């Protein structure tokens, strides 16, 4: 089960593409006065879930946004429609997290919300997976997010408020056949969300983990294998964006999309033997 990534073609362009109004005064911090908007950095914003999150925040009003992705043309289009700032970059490159954070702060003044939505996938037998693709999936889905959160957090902690939303996957909760490395990366992201939430208790900074199942995005085309299972059916990326907004607006630690997907995760936790037998048969 997978979610949408930022497109796989890296950007060659350096520097931001500004499509919003110049920076004004400080906005309300996410998690305190979220109904009034704030400042947000969204990664994986070129398409899919990330672009849907941008549209949802723009529709809510009051949000000033900086967007990151690797497809320059699509990122600029999304930014133009949302009145946002496009900062194309490949976050797997050394120092990209720090540069993006600095540029975002230059434009926004502060960061109330980080939505980490970038991701890539690969499907097939693990033994057939090229070593370079292992590095790419772990690099984009896990390491780039960890580095970016590490760059952003000190600013949120210093401000005494903020929210980090990590977009995971059901594959990280239950494991999915043919997606061993993707499942491993998303499982690590889920554990990171929990551990970081405990660590930040009392700082005013909150951590949310949004867990989609199958989402109707270009993700499957880009991973090289289409989604062919008759069930569960893919949901539109707007539903995941709604879940991100629910996490922000209502201070949710974890949101599954759709909500019933929490059931297999609970079964795996409560009765792992039963779950594995069912997964081996129907998986």
Image: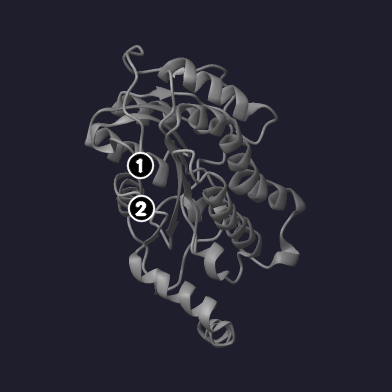
Give the Cα distance between marks 2 and 1. Answer: 8 Å
The mark tally for this picture is 2
Q: Is residue 283 visible?
A: no
Who is closer to the viewer here, 164 or 167? Answer: 164
Picture disc at residue 53 = 1
Quarter of the figure with residue 231: bottom left
Residue 235 placed where, x, y %? Answer: 34, 60
Q: Secondary structure at mark 1?
A: helix
Q: Residues within 10 Å of mark 2 (few under 14, many from 20)?
A: many
Residue 7 placed where, x, y %? Answer: 51, 41
Who is closer to the viewer here, 41 or 10? Answer: 41
Mark 2 vs 1: CB contact within 8 A: yes
Mark 2 or 1, nearer chain start: 1
Q: At x 56% / y 48%, what residue is drawn?
A: 196
Above or below — where is 49 with respect to 279? above
Picture disc at residue 240 = 2
Q: Does residue 38 appear left or right of residue 268 in this picture?
A: left
Who is closer to the viewer here, 153 or 102? Answer: 153
């Amino acid at each position: 089960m997978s979610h949408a990534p930022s497109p796989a073609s890296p950007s060659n362009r350096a520097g931001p593409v500004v499509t919003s109004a110049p920076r004004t005064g400080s906005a309300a911090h996410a998690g305190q006065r979220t109904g009034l908007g704030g400042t947000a950095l969204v990664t994986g914003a070129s398409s899919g879930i990330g672009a849907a999150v941008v549209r949802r925040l723009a529709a809510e009003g009051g949000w000033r946004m900086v967007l990151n992705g690797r497809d320059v043309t699509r990122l600029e289009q999304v930014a133009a429609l949302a009145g946002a700032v496009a900062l194309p970059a490949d976050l797997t490159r050394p120092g990209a997290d720090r540069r993006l954070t600095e540029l975002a702060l230059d434009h926004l003044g502060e960061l109330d919300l980080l939505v980490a939505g970038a991701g890539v996938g690969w499907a097939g037998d693990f033994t057939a997976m090229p070593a370079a693709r292992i590095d790419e999936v772990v690099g984009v889905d896990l390491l780039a997010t960890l580095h970016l959160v590490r760059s952003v957090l000190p600013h949120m902690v210093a401000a005494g408020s903020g929210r980090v939303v990590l977009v995971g996957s059901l594959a990280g909760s239950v494991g999915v056949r043919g997606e061993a490395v993707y499942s491993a990366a998303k499982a690590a992201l889920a554990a990171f969300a929990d551990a970081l939430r405990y660590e930040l208790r009392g700082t005013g900074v909150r951590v949310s983990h949004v867990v989609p199942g199958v989402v109707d995005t270009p993700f499957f085309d880009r991973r090289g294998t289409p989604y062919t299972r008759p069930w569960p059916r893919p949901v539109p990326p707007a539903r995941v964006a709604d879940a991100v907004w629910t996490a922000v607006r209502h201070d949710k630690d974890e949101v599954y999309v759709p909500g019933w997907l929490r059931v297999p995760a609970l079964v795996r936790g409560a009765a792992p033997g039963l779950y594995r037998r069912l997964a081996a048969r129907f998986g």
